[in-house]
Structures are given as C-alpha cells and as structure tokens.
Image (spheres, grey):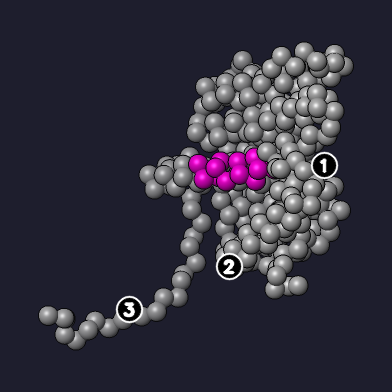
Amino acid sequence: MKRWWPYPLLTAALVAMWLLLTESVALGSILMGTILATVALWGFRALDPPGGRLKRPRAAFALAGLVMADVARSNLAVAKIILNPRKTERVSGFLRIPLDMRAPYGLATLACIITGTPGTIWVEYNSANNSILLHILDLVDEKTWIDTIKGRYEKRLMEIFE
Amino acid sequence: MTHLADLPVWAAIPVALLLLLGASLALIGSIGFVRLRSFYERVHAPTLGTTMGIGSVLLASMLCFTVLQSRLVLHEILIAIFMVVTTPITLMLLARAALYRDRSEGSDDVPAAPPVPPVQTAAPPAPDAAPPV
C-alpha cells in the first residue's frame, strides 16, 4: 500500500482534480485519474520532498474561510489606497517578524497567505534565526501587523502542521 | 453566444454584478501600477486582480453555466486553486530580485541582508605536485 501510494491525501486530491477537469465521474475517468495520480506521485517521491502531515484538517478549513474573508477586506483597503486622489502621508515599508513555526509546509502556506493577501508581500525568509521579511503597503502600526501575522495566522498554522 | 439570452433574470443580475466587480478590481489593480511610487509598492497592485478579481469572475462563470446547463459546473475551482498556488511564487520572485539588486547597489531604502552564519568549509585540496603535461 505504502509502496504504491506513498501520499494518499495527495493521490485523492489529484484524482479529484482529474474528475473536475474531465467533468465526469464515469468509471473510465476514475480509473484514468487514479493511474495518472499514482504515476505522477512516484515522480514526486523521487524529488524527496520534506516530510510533514496535515494534523487537523478541520482547522485547515476554518483557516481557509478566515483567509478568504481577510483577502476580501484587504482587497477593498488596497483599492481605496490606489484610488485615493490625495498623496497622503501613508507609509509603506519593510517589516521583519520573528517566527516560532519551523514546519516547512506551514511556512509555505504562510507565504501563500501573506503574498496572496493584497497589501502584504513575503520578501525573504531567514532560516538562521527563523524570521521573515515582509513589505507592507500601509504600514500604520508595526505592532498591529506583527500581532496579525503571529496571532491570526501563525498560531493556527502551527496547530495544523506541528 | 446567443444562448446567453436564455439566462433567467434572477441569475443574470448576480452574474453581471460579479463580472463588473471582478473587472473593476482588475482595472483598479492596473491603475495601481501607474499611481504607486516605488517598485515594492507596485508589486502589491496586481494582487487585486489575482484574488478577489479572478474570484468574482469565476463565481460568475460557475453561476452562469450551472444555470444554463442545468447541472453543477465546478471546474472553475481548479483555476482558483492554481492561481492561489502560483501567483505568490511570481510575486516573491520579483520582490526578491528587486531586493537583491537594491542590496548589491548598496541602496539605503532596503533592509540590509542578514549576516551569513560562518560556514565550515573543508580545507582546499592540496594542489597536485605536478601539473598534467
């Protein structure tokens, strides 16, 4: 079992992707999707990816909902900044945030969340002291941003991945 | 696309609104390229189009074709997933390239590179006694 399907969750996700792409749940599509997913993941295993597990899938769905709401809110905030006719005293700048999380997939997810949210972008990760460098479009209050990243996202990601 | 006229009004209105919202966000993002001042600020602008902009357009598409074809059309979800997974890579690559250039030019506007921890290197191999002829 382990030899043929080293990543059961990823296999299921790839089969689901295939079924969505072909828009059918016929036996032929399921069979073809399973064969493709199995062979693709043999290739993936050859890349020797770092280990890691999704410990709490339900918390992951809760986080996805939270991130979607945040993305919608920051879309409006950034749109307002761009359309603001006056060049106000808005400050943008870099911010370095120390992290506690070390799980590689947790860090990757955090990078996607931060960069995917308008107004913040992940610029650099320093593995020596486990800190990240962000660029923030509206850097009003550094402490608020640090609390948001650490309290809102990092805490939940650590629950999910560590 | 004449069969679009078959779309009932109750579905046509949200589809139109979602399309307008998505298009407006993509437009505002593009305006941001002109209005924002530095490169690092401009990197933020396209994320409007790649998040809620594309999200609204995909929702409109799902709603439109689900109603038109009287079956659940969901494969737009894949586009959303691929966008979420791939856009950050491009943006990060651009931001990091800019940071690398600014640092190598000694710019004061960007934070300095973190000190590199000393790496234990092996002693260089002794040169061969006689070079090959």
- Mark 2 vs mark 1: tell me if same chain: yes
Q: Is residue B113 visible?
A: yes
| Residue at figure coordinates x 57%, y 65% from the top left | A47
| Residue at figure coordinates x 61%, y 52% from the top left | A132
Q: CA distance from mark 3 to mark 1?
A: 54 Å
The mark found on residue B124 in the picture is 3
The mark found on residue A65 in the picture is 1
Q: B5 or B113: nearer the eye? A: B5
Q: Pointer 1: residues within 10 angstroms few (<14), some, or many (20+)?
A: few
Of all chains, the one bearing label 3 is B
Q: Which element carries disc 1, helix, strand or loop?
A: helix
Image coords of residue B90 (percent x, y): 55, 42
Q: Which element carries disc 3, helix, strand or loop?
A: loop
Quarter of the image for the C terminus of chain B: give it. bottom left
Quarter of the image for the N terminus of chain B: give it. top right
Q: Quadrant of residue B120?
A: bottom left
| Residue at figure coordinates x 81%, y 17% from the top left | B7
Image coords of residue B11 (percent x, y): 84, 19
Which of labels 2 and 1 is toward the front?
2
Q: CA distance from mark 3 to mark 2?
A: 33 Å
Q: Pointer 3: residues within 10 angstroms few (<14), some, or many (20+)?
A: few
- Mark 3 vs mark 1: tell me if same chain: no
Q: Is residue A10 visible?
A: no
* Residue segment shown in magenta: B81-94
Q: Residue furthest front?
A: A28
Amino acid at pointer 2 = Ala
The residue where tag 2 is placed is A46
Q: Is residue B25 above or below residue A50?
A: above
Of all chains, the one bearing label 1 is A
Which of labels 3 and 2 is toward the front?
2
Image coords of residue A56 (percent x, y): 84, 59
Q: B6 or B26: nearer the eye? A: B6
